[in-house]
Image (tube, rainbow, N blue to C red):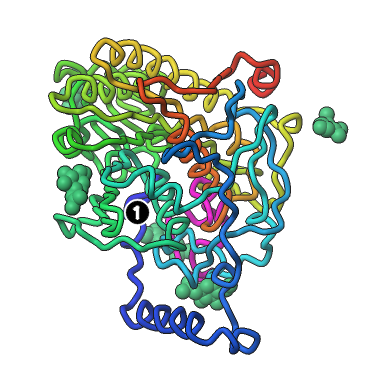
Amino acid sequence: METPLGKFPKLHKTPIILVLATFALVTIVLLCNTLQGYLYLPQDLSKPPPSDNGELRGSKYVAVTTKKCDIFSGEWVPNPDGPYYTNTTCWAIHEHQNCMKYGRPDTEFMKWRWKPDDCELPLFDPTQFLEIVRGKSMAFVGDSVGRNHMQSLICLLSRVEYPIDVSYTPDEHFKRWRYTTYNFTIATFWTPHLVKTEQADANGPTHTGLFNLYLDEFDEEWTTQIDDFDYIIINAGHWFFRSSIYYESRGIVGCRYCLLDNVTDLPMSYGYRKAFRTAFRAINSLKNFKGITYLRTFAPSHFENGVWNQGGDCKRTRPVLSNETSFESIELELYLTQIEEFRIAEKEGKKKGLRFRLLDTTQAMLLRPDGHPSTYGHWAHENVTLYNDCVHWCLPGPIDAWNDFLLEMLKMEGEHGRLSGYEHKLYLSDKRMRLFK
Ligand SMILES: *[C@@H]1O[C@H](CO)[C@@H](O)[C@H](O)[C@H]1NC(C)=O
Ligand SMILES: *[C@@H]1O[C@H](CO)[C@@H](O)[C@H](O)[C@H]1NC(C)=O
Ligand SMILES: *[C@@H]1O[C@H](CO)[C@@H](O)[C@H](O)[C@H]1NC(C)=O
Ligand SMILES: *[C@@H]1O[C@H](CO)[C@@H](O)[C@H](O)[C@H]1NC(C)=O
Ligand SMILES: *[C@@H]1O[C@H](CO)[C@@H](O)[C@H](O)[C@H]1NC(C)=O
């Protein structure tokens, strides 16, 4: 399976016997309460789910953040009750994000929750989520960090229900899952550059491939498939660090680190901007689409003491405070670029009654250098491209908070296409300005 920086083997499939064994265990637990003291119970089966923090008005869940609050500006605070699933209760954890399996020794990184400065962000409530999305469908469009997000969602929902596989192709890049009780569908669309792309050279100047990006052409693998979805969660980022040749109107306009004499080198944000512009244009030009588009903003990587292929690693075991870190300039540039394109698309969409929302996970994740697999995404003797993975996120782990955000945003969605109780200060708050120094 493709990852931002290299190829990994395909998604790990849990043998049916394990699924049956888990089912049997659950049944035993339910039938024999008296045995509980004697059985080893996976942590999250023996523990009640977090309480329903949402107020119930009529039959509708509403957000708790009723006063103006920027839910994306905050800090991580201890949550001794976490996590809410483990690798034994959830089969959806991608092999390379199953950090506990590969011997990660510390567990504190799973025990934090996001605390916005001016309000509380409720922990994910799977029943509430499934009630809200009953009869609906959600598409994850983008790269393997988007897949990482979807697998976190499946694991968080697993306390209530597991989906069945209803994929229409054996290609692991295009999965479709269905929650039968709730008639809710999740799909993933693999499009790490968002636009039409070809691999020009598997090796390239940095041995991570050289790609032809057709910056003004739709990637029809997803743009032709999403008309009927109620929610699109779109993301892109780490693949734009690779060498690429930029095409517009079918001609070369420049490249990003292609080292070809006759091609002008352009900044990475050039391709990134145009790719988002084209992807949003595709969404805004769909005939029947009536859904909500969430831009899940760039999640920074945390290589320290070297870049990804020169010994860089992420060995921390605790989050940092927002006054203890700041962005790398290139990451800030990507973040601001995608938000500028988002704003343009949002305005365009409004004319057609389409809703665009920012799922601005960037600040929260900037503060989680402890949340990546590092060397615990594979066995020590295995030779994988991304040996120290400081890009993806361990499951369970801080990426689970993305679904806390998502649920809260779903709850804030008003009847008339407006977000209620919602304030998003973006980079304008003093605190954020400090992060972006
Ligand atoms: C889950 O993690 C444990 C270590 O905590 C490991 O021994 C086990 O093999 C893992 N199981 C699966 C199914 O990944
Ligand atoms: C399931 O949801 C879809 C929309 O996603 C709807 O068209 C269909 O009628 C629903 N099926 C049932 C059985 O409710
Ligand atoms: C650049 O030069 C290579 C050969 O060195 C050629 O194949 C390619 O078409 C040239 N590209 C442009 C944009 O002129
Ligand atoms: C960051 O803020 C905390 C309080 O929120 C404070 O205790 C700490 O000293 C600050 N650290 C720095 C480096 O300013
Ligand atoms: C790892 O694999 C690559 C090719 O897949 C090879 O070039 C490299 O030498 C291998 N490294 C080790 C330490 O085996």
Residue 196 percent across, percent down from the top left: 20, 31
Mark 1 vs ligand 5: CB below 8 Å: no
Q: Which residues are magenta?
A: 372-394
Measured along the vertical axis of the image, is residue 127 above or below residue 233? below
* Residue at 20% over, 17% down: 248
Q: Residues within 10 Å of mark 1 (few under 14, many from 20)?
A: few
- Predominant SS along the magenta part: loop
Label 1: state its secondary structure. strand
Residue 20 % position (x, y) = 35, 81
Describe residue 373's horizontal placement relative to residue 287 as left or right: right
Does 373 appear in magenta?
yes
Quarter of the image for the C terminus: give it.
top right
Report the side of 159 relative to 301 (left or right). Answer: left
Question: In this rendering, is residue 377 above or below 212?
Answer: below
Q: Quadrant of residue 27?
A: bottom left
Q: Is residue 75 magenta?
A: no
Residue 190 lies, in percent from the top left, at 27, 44
Residue at point 28%, 20% (across, down): 354
Place of residue 104 in the rendered image (x, y in percent of width and height, measured from the top left): 61, 65
User: Mark 1 highlights which residue?
Assistant: 7
Q: Nearer the viewer, residue 188 or 375?
A: 188
